[in-house]
Amino acid sequence: MKTLSKNEMRTAVESLIANGAVVKNYAKFARIQAIEAVGGEVIETILADGTKETSNTANAGDWIQVTLHNLFDPKVPIRQNEYPSVPVEQKHTPSNRVSLNPQFLKYDPIASSGVNVGYNPTEQTVGPGEKIQYLWHADREYGAALLTSFGDLRNHRHHGLFGAILIEPPKAKYYRGIRPDRNHHGEQAVITAPGVEPYREFVLFAHNGIRLLDRDGALIKTTEQGGEHGGHGAPDHEDTGEKGYNYRSERFFNRLRRNPLPFQVFDSKVHGDPATPLLRSYARERIIIRLLMPGDKPRNISFTLHGHRWRTQPDDPFSRIVPIQGAMSVGNVFNIEPEPVSCPGDYLYRSGSLRWDVESGMWGIFRIVSRNVRYYCETSCRNFRQWWEKKWYEK
């Protein structure tokens, strides 16, 4: 496969556009800080243009051109952090170079993989103050795919430098409310596509071993807070670091300080909604959860959604039906489609490990509400827009 220079890549993209291919542009910025939130506080990942982001979305068949900007300050050295700890004898020198590697997608491995390998002549990472372009091809509908930086696997992941790209059905449209969302970023959206039953989509990064700071900038060490602080004493190295979803956690430690009654720890009427993503849906609505495990510790976790069950292989009608997804490790992605539920209410989603994960904040709420006027209005508007666009294209 031929190595492409920046000018050759630009020429290739222009040629694709001229021949009718869909090419989507994304700008990624590599300085990310993960912090812990308290109950009711909303923390979002914001792009440079002000767009809220957790994941990027493309459709099957799209060509995707990504521009990665490195916003590290070259004057500030990257320190070797002692927490979360890694029991290795070899001294590791942190790097301020970053990259992006897409899971599943097709690309030129010499020019657009984001990985420096052997004697490949093209630099795949980018230094502070610089930018680089990658060109990827979504050849089919993959659902969720991880984005990983190979500039420094040891340090970047536990600082939160990871992401996802979602490959939807061809000609898919994304809705928030009654209007299409042209930004294609976010944790939740309604997806419509020709020949596909519409579905509400949620994106969840389940991560552990993350370095989190509190609102005052102090380092959080839940697993090392023993005795009166509500921790568990000195842990194994694989249990250090903080747990959560989408850079957010809801630790029992904070909730029990406000109200010491353990049986009310999940109660939103007492504590307010958790800081972790609040997933919202209507009764009997089709939903798909894009569940990803980007980092950082190799200890497996699991995921369960109370009151729901799903097929382990969504496209196989003979697949096992389970209430929990186990054996989740770094690099795993799952496209979970729970069976529709008719009963409105709050359903807990969480890790299967109560002691190390759930107490450390790895849980959240899936809220189902009854179908109301808003639901029927949104559905009718989306259906009318699809009908109108179909008629317009037929002309």
Image: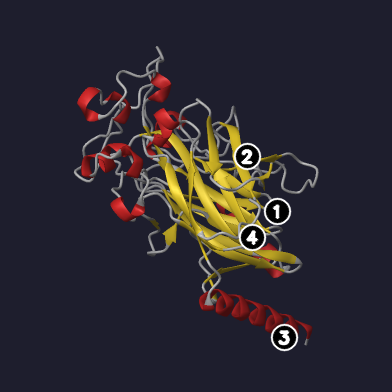
As measured in the structure, the alpha-carbon distance from the residue carrying label 1 to the one carrying label 4 is: 18 Å
As measured in the structure, the alpha-carbon distance from the residue carrying label 3 to the one carrying label 1 is: 26 Å
- Which one is closest to the eye, mark 4 or mark 2? 4
Q: Earlier in the sequence, mark 1 or mark 4?
A: 1
Label 1 SS? loop
Question: What amino acid does circle 2 point to?
Answer: Ile
Q: Position of residue 281 (x, y in %)?
A: 53, 62
Q: Residue 376 sits in which quadrant?
A: bottom right
- Which one is closest to the eye, mark 2 or mark 1? 1
Q: How many marks?
A: 4
Question: What amino acid does circle 3 point to?
Answer: Trp
Q: Is residue 93 left or right of residue 167?
A: left
Q: Earlier in the sequence, mark 3 or mark 1?
A: 1
Which disc number belongs to residue 110? Answer: 2
Question: What amino acid does circle 4 point to?
Answer: Arg
Label 3 SS? helix
Q: How is the image coloured?
A: secondary structure
Q: Earlier in the sequence, mark 4 or mark 2?
A: 2
134, 218: nearer the viewer: 218
Q: Which residue is mark 4?
A: 286
Q: Earlier in the sequence, mark 2 or mark 3?
A: 2
**Residue at position x 28%, y 30% from top?**
221
Q: Position of residue 291 (x, y in %)?
A: 56, 45
Q: Which residue is mark 1?
A: 141
Q: Earlier in the sequence, mark 2 or mark 1?
A: 2
